[in-house]
Amino acid sequence: MPISVVTSNTINFLISTIIIIVLCFISGLGLTWYALLYPVILIIQYVLILGIAFIVSAVTVYIRDLEHIIGVVLMAAFYATPIVYRVDQLPANLQIIMKLNPMTYIIDGYRDIFYYQQMPDFYHLGILFAISIVLLIFGYMIFRKLQKGFAEQL
């Protein structure tokens, strides 16, 4: 179930990317070869979100109130993700906090390839990918372990 939800939302994200590409052309930026790095960033995002989805979906079956807490956490995470602003526009003490958000590096990667038309920060994206792989494995193990009791809890 988590795989199908994350995959379907990733497909929706792919379709939404068409709007970004159109806006790049309308604004006169166009696309450069850096846009070919889009799948790399998307894979990192997919692995990260899938790992989180495995953990959250498995634990939420047993702790029902977690669903409401996650809604609040996701809303806070949305506002704490630099989507319409860059991290370097913030004071130094807030930049440190913002860099703890893994989506910061993913959003910056998309911004780099489409808007700034430059090479994304693969150092931090590589670290994030390694963490995402570990999170995916850990999340899958938790999901498999807790899956045995799903029918009883539901």
Image (cartoon, helix red, strand yellow):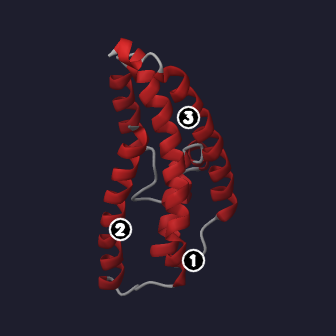
Mark 1 packing: few (<14 Cα in 10 Å), some, or many (20+)? some
Q: Earlier in the sequence, mark 1 or mark 2?
A: 2
Closer to the camera, 124 or 61?
Answer: 61
Element type at mark 2 = helix
Q: Which mark is residue 140?
A: 3
Q: Circle 1 — which element? A: loop
Q: Nearer the viewer, mark 1 or mark 2?
A: 2
63 w.r.t. 10: above or below: above
Residue shown at 49%/52% (left/top)? Answer: 46
Is the residue under label 3 in contact with that under label 1 (CB below 8 Å)?
A: no
**Pointer 1 or 3: first along the chain:** 1
Query: At label 3, which amino acid type do we have?
Result: Tyr
Q: Cβ–Cβ below 8 Å for labels 1 and 2?
A: no
Q: Earlier in the sequence, mark 3 or mark 2?
A: 2
Residue 11 seen anywhere in this rendered image of the structure: yes
* Residue 118 - label: 1
Specify the quadrant of the image occupied by residue 154: top left
Count of number-bearing discs = 3
Q: Quadrant of residue 34?
A: bottom right
* Residue occupying image coordinates x 38% and y 55%: 10
Mark whose residue sits in front, 1 or 3: 3
> To which residue does mark 2 refer?
17
Please give the name of the residue rendered at 35% of the width and 68% of the height, measured from the top-left corner: 17
Residue 137 to residue 44: above or below? above
Q: Are marks 3 and 2 in contact (CB under 8 Å)?
A: no
* Mark 2 residue type: Thr
* Residue at 63 percent of width and 50 percent of height: 128
C-alpha distance separating marks 3 and 2 = 28 Å
Q: Is residue 76 above or below residue 26?
A: above
Residue 150 position in % (x across, y down): 40, 19
